[in-house]
Amino acid sequence: MSNLIDIQSQIEKLQKQAESLKAKEFNNTVAEIRAKMKAFGITIKDLGLKSSQKSKSAKANKTNKARKSKAAGIPVAAKYKGPKGETWSGRGLTPKWLAALLAQGHKKEEFLI
């Protein structure tokens, strides 16, 4: 009867075999695809793909956007507190309650937490 360690060992060996086969067959598969594309006159645009140069820069842009959006979703501790308990982190647009108080002659520093 096989135990967990034996099964994990078998899985690891099979994964290595799969990677080896994939590496061996990769170039032949690409050549076959290119030959069929040429025979049928299929372009990258027909497949709905972009050229490798553009796709690399598109991936970089998506990565940068993902980084920005992740940072945008992180809550930040309040830095200012208004007289009615309103709070503001100090990021983004000044809230209406603070803008009104500033217009009355108050200073931001008065509302620091």
Image (cartoon, helix red, strand yellow):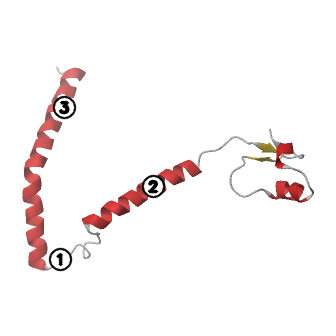
Residue flagged by tag 3: what amino acid is it?
A: Glu
Q: Which of the two marks, 1 or 3, is nearer to us in this view? A: 1
What kind of residue is marked 2?
A: Asn
In the depicted structure, whether residue 108 falls above or below residue 2: below
Report the Cα–Cα distance between label 2 and label 3: 34 Å
| Residue type indicated by callout 1 | Ile
Identify which residue, 18 or 87, lies in the foreground.
87
Q: Residues within 10 Å of mark 1 (few under 14, many from 20)?
A: few
Kindly identify the residue that appears in the image at 87 percent across and 55 percent down: 102
Identify the residue under disc 3: 12
Q: Which residue is labeled 1 in the image?
A: 42
Position of 42 compared to 57: left or right?
left
Crowd band around label 2 with a 10 angstrom C-alpha radius: few (<14), some (14–19), many (20+): few
**Is 23 placed above or below 100 here?**
above
* Image location (x, y in percent) of residue 104: 93, 57
Which element carries disc 1, helix, strand or loop? Answer: loop
Residue 34 appears in which quarter of the rendering? bottom left
Sequence-wise, which precedes: disc 1 or disc 3?
Answer: 3
Identified at 72% across, 58% down, the residue is 93
- CA gap, disc 1 to disc 3? 39 Å
**Taking 40 as reference, is 52 above or below it?**
above
Q: Which residue is mark 2?
A: 64
Check the picture and name the quadrant holding the N terminus: top left
Residue at the bottom extreme of this rendering: 41
